Image (cartoon, grey):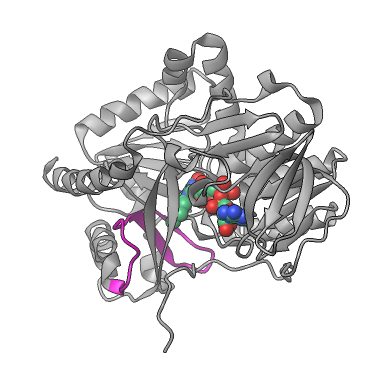
Amino acid sequence: MPTPTFREPIWRKSERWAGAAGPLRVRVPLELLAIGGGFLGLSTALHAARQGLSVAVAEAGSIGEGASGLNGGHVIPGFKYDPDRLVELFGDARGNAMAAFGATTADAVFDLIASERLDVPHVRLGWIQAAHTNAALAAIEKRDRAWKSFGADVATLSADKIAQLTGARGYLGGWLDRRAGVVDPLSLVTELACVARAQGVQIGEGVRIVSLRRNGTLWSAEMDTGTTIEARHVLIATNADTDGLIPGLAQTLVPLHSFQIATAPLPPEIGATILAEGQAVSDSRRILVYYRKTADGRLVLGGRGRMAVPQDPSDWRHLERALLRLYPELAGIAIDRRWFGRVAMTADHLPHIHEPEPGLLTLVGCQGRGVALMIAMGRRFADYLAGGDREALPLPVTPVSPIPLHRFRRVGIAAAIGWYRALDAFER
Ligand SMILES: Cc1cc2nc3c(=O)[nH]c(=O)nc-3n(C[C@H](O)[C@H](O)[C@H](O)COP(=O)(O)OP(=O)(O)OC[C@H]3O[C@@H](n4cnc5c(N)ncnc54)[C@H](O)[C@@H]3O)c2cc1C
């Protein structure tokens, strides 16, 4: 029997995506080469092609093989920081512009699904942030005030209301963000590839870019086959899989593992009491778990996993324990699938845009919240590539600045995760 890789999610590929294996044959210089065929690379490619640019996407594996096909499918607007904190950090103009962009990122996903009639299972009934301590409740109330003053459709939830919506044990209250929802992420990324290709984007799977060289006003990207592609602009859309194409970029990130489990379809009498209205949930623990139901009635729950590559189903045991803590009635329900992927964290918990040389652009550091962000950023990058107005980008363009002692950060983070789990167990 082959050794499991734990890289096969419960999600399904678009039926009309037949793949794009084989070399990219590009004979004349392109306007844009996107490296990475996830949400960011494909969304930028689609919108750039719509603006009349000639575009190709090089994906080292297959479409959806990265985080975009492996994630939990929670479509959550905004950044980790609320509007008031963004203003504190970046000042009025930039902070408010970032918050205004953040407020619309989930719209970008659901508008795309609707306008392109994408065949993507989805529900837009909101995302719940669930509080398990009084301190978390206070933080949620502050968050509610910050977003309400920004005009967002959000509400606090009492202990009774959150128990009714989630069916879960142990929450003191929560926050509902009605702008959010859930999608099947693998359907979304492969459907996005279909519409990008229909718009004229060339897509190559199994095409790894191994080096980049500037050649006057053009970039020359060498593929692992030894041949090159020339383009006026290159977008590095490799997020947690970032390698050495831009010196120092990988050292600005700490890639962490996020693990997920999917139950068997729940028996109807139990399923009706769990997330009855279809919201997604993240809880307030420092090492949070996040969960949702699928179109076929499974519960999919995710959370941080060990730093080493998992070898065995027992590496998911902490998530199975979390599932039963929330829903003791699920004891005895089979876990049908376990998988994992990498999320890219930055030191300041914000995504970073860099343009270290003219024509070489990147956005990295999704903090585990990149479904809405990366799709929305694609349109803004395409506007920038077509129009050249850097100030119109929703995030500042910053220099690549590696995390000091980067090599040792992973060890420190692994130790901190153990400590936070212990605190979560004791704090009430
Ligand atoms: C388990 C998990 C759960 C998550 N849950 C959520 C969630 O519920 N909600 C949410 O908002 N976010 C979530 N995220 C984060 C979200 O999935 C990511 O932020 C988002 O998918 C990043 O998209 P991307 O296009 O930037 O990168 P990716 O989708 O990772 O794509 C990068 C691609 O680049 C390719 N690549 C790398 N190097 C090269 C090269 N040299 N040449 C060519 N190709 C290359 C890789 O093969 C990969 O396919 C989760 C992530 C994980 C891993």
Quadrant holding the C terminus: top left
Q: Residue at x 60, y 27 (%)?
A: 101
Q: Is residue 299 left or right of residue 221?
A: left
Quadrant holding the N terminus: bottom left
Q: Residue at x 49, y 56 (%)?
A: 71
| Residue found at the very far bottom of the displayed protein | 1
Q: Is 308 colored magenta in this rendering?
A: yes
Q: Residue at x 30, y 74 (%)?
A: 312
Q: Nearer the viewer, residue 312 or 268?
A: 312
Q: Is residue 57 above or below residue 298?
A: above
- Give the image location of residue 146, x and y in percent: 43, 20
**Residue span colored magenta:** 291-313
| Residue found at the very far left of the displayed protein | 426
Q: Is residue 253 left or right of residue 423?
A: right
Q: Nearer the viewer, residue 258 or 352?
A: 352
Q: Is residue 220 left or right of residue 54?
A: left
Q: Is 121 colored magenta in this rendering?
A: no
- Give the image location of residue 297, x and y in percent: 47, 67
Q: Nearer the viewer, residue 143 or 156?
A: 143
Q: Residue at x 18, y 44 (%)?
A: 424
Task: Give the image quarter of residue 139.
Answer: top left
Residue 195 visible? The answer is no
| Residue found at the very far top of the displayed protein | 92
Number of marks in the rendered image: 0
Task: Give the image quarter of residue 402.
Answer: top left
Task: Give the image quarter of residue 293.
Answer: bottom left
Residue 293 visible? The answer is yes
- Give the image location of residue 210, x and y in percent: 61, 54
